[in-house]
Amino acid sequence: GAVVSQHPSWVICKSGTSVKIECRSLDFQATTMFWYRQFPKQSLMLMATSNEGSKATYEQGVEKDKFLINHASLTLSTLTVTSAHPEDSSFYICSANNRHRAKNIQYFGAGTRLSVL
Amino acid sequence: DQQVKQNSPSLSVQEGRISILNCDYTNSMFDYFLWYKKYPAEGPTFLISISSIKDKNEDGRFTVFLNKSAKHLSLHIVPSQPGDSAVYFCAASPNTGNQFYFGTGTSLTVIP
């Protein structure tokens, strides 16, 4: 149990286009979903926390108009990178809390590698 | 500012021996700590956790030790197996929320 699916696993896009990444909890309802970004040889950096049905809480320095997060249901959160530029190229990974289990354990998706040309 | 640090980017250990992975943190508000394991092309998977009210938690071959005064935790794997070869991340959460702050990871290689 506690499987999180992230799609796509890899996306290449042109500069100026928008890219949507989906994060789904397959066998549980997620109280909260998290979006992280990881640069090479660096740690996972929390970008935002989203609770179903409410606005996401963004970490300091993360542009909310650039990284749009929608958490429409207890099993789906999406991250849209708007007007992507080469500096947005990174590894994006989501995680989710299982509302029926310990809140402090997060279950991760496999990540999405975004390459902006 | 990196609040959780893993100063060893890599570690190699012989099969059957002990693997010790270290993690340091700076924020005294952190009160819950986890270790995650990550294989290539997969997301991190939860391994073991410890809360600040304890100084040790054991689960099979994996033991996590917490030294609050030193703001240091370590993961011991005994005996190490080739299947343990992966990147290990430590993560810490403050008592004010459920956000986690991750270290940069340590790549463990267990040599058969």
Image (cartoon, coloured by chain):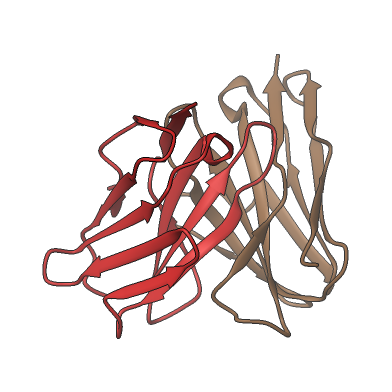
Chain colours: A brown, B red
Is residue A71 visible in the rendered image? The answer is yes
Residue reaching furthest to the left: B69
Q: Residue at x 45, y 29 (%)?
A: B109
Above or below B37: residue B72: below
Q: Residue at x 80, y 67 (%)?
A: A1
Residue reaching furthest to the top: A117
Could you tell whether A40 is left or right of B12 in the image? right
Q: How many marks?
A: 0
**Measured from the top left, where is residue A101 in percent x and y?**
67, 82
Q: Nearer the viewer, residue A21 or A61?
A: A21
Is residue B31 visible in the rendered image? The answer is no
Q: Identify the image quadrant of residue B75.
A: bottom left
Residue reaching furthest to the front: B16
Above or below A93: residue A89: above
Above or below A37: residue B31: below
Q: Identify the image quadrant of residue B108.
A: top left
Q: Nearer the viewer, residue B94 or A65?
A: B94
Could you tell whether B32 is left or right of B42 in the image? left
Above or below B89: residue B28: below
Could you tell whether A22 is left or right of B37 in the image? right
Q: Residue at x 49, y 45 (%)?
A: A44
Q: Residue at x 43, y 33 (%)?
A: B107
**Measured from the top left, where is residue A18 in percent x and y?**
79, 34
Could you tell whether B42 is left or right of B95 in the image? right
**Measured from the top left, where is residue A38 in percent x and y?**
53, 38
**Measured from the top left, where is residue B22 in percent x and y?**
28, 49
